[in-house]
Image (cartoon, rainbow, N blue to C red):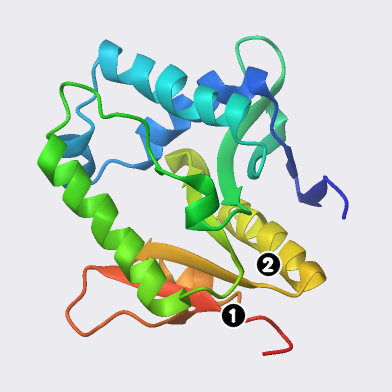
């Protein structure tokens, strides 16, 4: 499948390792919920952890995780390049192939709360998907200046097209507020009543 698609001045491409600092900055700009601030308190040391221990490490050691970028060709960053305004991360592996999702937590993160959150998400994924082969939408982050302009939809559609081509399902654990975006792409919410997280699956076409 092609590596580039466009919507107005927004262009989706596969990310490169040089994009990781901008991806880190978008992550902090996009995920401002109180619980994220408690688990990943914004500080220079945490920003280095997100950059090096998390994203750079995944980029270098996990080729089955596909990082994507959306750039605005009508805007430039400080280096004069098209501004990176959103990113996505699709994981094409199964959990047992991937291993631990995150690196060891930064010392300023509350260890037990982080483990409880991630383990809960992993259990939900297993409950909904079981051993069925699927691609996992790990992260979609859009800079606040560009939200509701189609960048997120482009990132979701990329993985859905790949899943359809490969005849596999797809899964995402989304916020309840973000669930409508995924529903537009065929995801169904399988989370139990009262859950704070939407456990969403998009079953393969031949299922």
Q: Where is residue 25 in the image (x, y as percent from the top left)?
A: 44, 25
Say which of 127 and 38 sits in front.
Answer: 127
Q: Where is residue 24 in the image (x, y as percent from the top left)?
A: 46, 26
Say which of 105 and 71 sits in front.
Answer: 105
Gap in angstroms between the C-alphas marked 2 and 1: 9 Å
Say which of 153 and 102 sits in front.
Answer: 102
Q: Earlier in the sequence, mark 2 or mark 1?
A: 2
Q: Is residue 63 above or below residue 205?
A: above
Query: Residue 100 falls in which quadrant of the image?
Result: top left
Q: Would residue 53 be found to the left or right of residue 36 on screen?
A: right
Is residue 147 something one can see in this rendering? no
Q: Position of residue 156 (x, y in %)?
A: 61, 60
Q: Position of residue 53 (x, y in %)?
A: 41, 21
Badge 1 element = loop
Q: Is residue 146 above or below residue 1?
A: above
Mark 2, other Cα within 10 Å: few <14 / some 14–19 / many ≥20: many
For label 1, the residue is: 186
Q: Is residue 36 above or below residue 21?
A: below
Q: In which quarter of the image is the N terminus?
A: bottom right
Say which of 60 and 159 sits in front.
Answer: 60
- Which residue of the protein is positioned furthest toward the front in this rendering? 96
Is residue 95 something one can see in this rendering? yes
- Marks 2 & 1, CB-CB < 8 Å contact: yes
Q: Which residue is drawn at 45% across and 45% down?
A: 99
For label 2, the residue is: 160
Q: Residue at x 62, y 23 (%)?
A: 19
Q: Would residue 79 be found to the left or right of residue 129 on screen?
A: right
């Amino acid at each position: 499948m092609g590596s580039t698609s466009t919507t107005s001045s927004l262009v989706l491409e596969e990310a490169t390792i040089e994009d990781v600092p901008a991806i880190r900055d978008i992550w902090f700009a996009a995920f401002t919920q109180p619980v994220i601030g408690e688990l990943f308190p914004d500080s220079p040391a945490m920003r280095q952890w997100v950059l090096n221990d998390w994203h750079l490490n995944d980029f270098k050691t996990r080729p089955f995780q596909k990082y994507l970028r959306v750039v605005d060709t009508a805007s430039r960053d400080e280096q004069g390049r098209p501004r990176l305004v959103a990113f996505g991360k699709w994981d094409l592996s199964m959990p047992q192939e991937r291993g631990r999702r995150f690196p060891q937590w930064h010392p300023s993160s509350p260890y037990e709360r982080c483990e409880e959150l991630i383990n809960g998400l992993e259990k939900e994924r297993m409950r909904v998907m079981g051993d069925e082969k699927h691609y996992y939408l790990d992260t979609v982050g859009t800079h606040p200046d560009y939200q509701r302009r189609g960048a997120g939809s482009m990132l979701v559609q990329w993985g859905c097209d790949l899943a359809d081509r490969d005849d596999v399902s797809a899964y995402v654990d989304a916020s309840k507020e973000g669930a409508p975006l995924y529903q537009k792409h065929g995801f169904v919410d399988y989370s139990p009543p009262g859950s704070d997280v939407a456990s969403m699956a998009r079953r393969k076409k031949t299922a």
